[in-house]
């Protein structure tokens, strides 16, 4: 099934290099559905349509469509969208009709009003700087219907690992994850390298993949041709201040996915915003 694309606003942003490489591995390297119960609970009183910013390969978007929501996914990476379209095409017709995928910039969009806006996993911190993060929050405010809520998760593991060890030059690559392709049975290794950063907020990473064929000898390597993968880290306090600047009121902040009060041990923060 070919999904209709809508031309998006002009933007100077381009997909981060690693997303074009990782797309073919993403669903089984990042095979995690433990947060979906959280999204069900967060959105239980939310009316369609929904908007997911940085929808990737459609992991959450498809599940929400199966729950009956009409949902639009916005994604910068063409490779991620291709994977999402392949998965959506395998859904039944009623689910497919509830889904719209757009290629575009989450810091510059206007597709009408939505009952809820979500941004999961690391999508928000992959915006390159505070200015783009503020632009995104302003777009979210504009997109929310009266009474609508936005939910954004940010990871705490992006705390500046590279800066903690005061890197002046890139670290050696180290094995980040070792997994097996469920379709081919081939072993695949994900390697990571930390890079130096010139600012307090930014953490820089580079990833590459090695795929070992069935004979264990032939190896195919996949890596971005250039560039670093950038996380623009943000603290809970800065996120609340930035949202206020965008005209959003922080209704609640949770730790991880079980709605606990956040503390320093949490790996993820979940924010709930409404129009101020």
Image: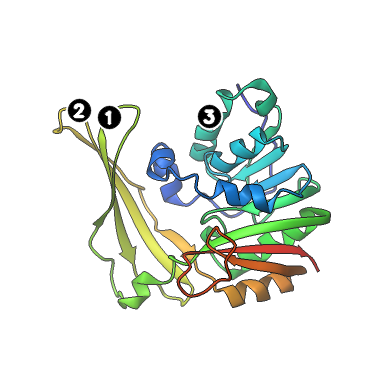
Assess disc 1: are there few (<14), some (14-19) or many (≥20) residues with their C-alpha within 10 Å of its C-alpha: few
Question: Gap between marks 1 and 3, in whole Å?
Answer: 20 Å
Indicate the position of residue 253 as horizontal and vertical percent values: 63, 68
Q: Give the residue at x 58% y 48%.
A: 37
Question: Gap between marks 1 and 2, in whole Å?
Answer: 7 Å
Indicate the position of residue 133 as horizontal and vertical percent values: 62, 64
Question: Gap between marks 3 and 2, in whole Å?
Answer: 26 Å
- Picture disc at residue 169: none
Question: In the displayed structure, would residue 211 be above or below residue 35?
Answer: above
Q: Secondary structure at mark 3?
A: helix
Q: Give the residue at x 50% y 33%.
A: 83
Q: Would you name the residue on which mark 2 appears?
A: 214
Indicate the position of residue 178 as horizontal and vertical percent values: 27, 46
Q: Secondary structure at mark 1?
A: loop
Task: Compare residues 9 and 237 and report the one nearer the observer.
Answer: 237
Q: Would you name the residue on which mark 1 appears?
A: 185
Answer with mark 1 or mark 2, whichever residue precedes in sequence: 1
Q: Is residue 198 left or right of residue 70?
A: left
Q: Give the residue at x 34% y 77%.
A: 164
Q: Is residue 187 left or right of residue 35?
A: left
Q: Secondary structure at mark 2?
A: loop
Quadrant of the rendered image containing residue 27: top left
- Picture disc at residue 87: 3
Q: Is residue 27 left or right of residue 243?
A: left
């Amino acid at each position: 099934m070919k999904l209709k694309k809508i031309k998006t606003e002009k933007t100077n942003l381009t997909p981060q290099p690693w997303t074009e490489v990782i797309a073919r591995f993403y669903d089984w390297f990042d095979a995690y559905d433990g947060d979906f119960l959280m999204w069900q609970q967060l959105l239980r009183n939310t009316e369609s349509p929904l908007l997911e910013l940085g929808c990737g390969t459609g992991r959450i978007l498809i599940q929400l469509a199966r729950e009956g929501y009409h949902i639009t996914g916005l994604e910068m990476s063409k490779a991620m969208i291709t994977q999402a379209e392949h998965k959506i095409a395998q859904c039944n017709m009623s689910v497919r009709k509830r889904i719209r995928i757009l290629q575009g910039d989450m810091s510059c969009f206007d597709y009408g009003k939505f009952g809820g806006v979500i941004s999961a996993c690391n999508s928000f911190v992959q915006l390159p700087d505070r200015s783009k993060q503020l632009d995104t929050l302003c777009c979210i405010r504009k997109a929310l219907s009266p009474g609508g809520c936005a939910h954004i998760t940010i990871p705490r593991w992006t705390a500046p690992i590279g800066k903690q060890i005061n890197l002046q030059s890139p670290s050696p690559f180290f094995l980040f994850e070792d997994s097996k392709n469920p379709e081919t049975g081939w072993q695949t290794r994900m390697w990571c390298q930390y890079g130096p950063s010139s600012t307090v907020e930014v953490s820089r990473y580079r990833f590459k993949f090695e795929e070992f064929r069935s004979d264990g000898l032939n190896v195919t390597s996949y890596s971005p041709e250039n560039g670093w993968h950038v996380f623009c880290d943000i603290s809970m306090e800065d996120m609340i201040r930035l949202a206020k600047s965008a005209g959003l009121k922080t209704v609640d902040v949770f730790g991880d996915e079980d709605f606990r009060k956040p503390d320093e041990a949490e790996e993820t923060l979940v924010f709930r915003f409404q129009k101020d």
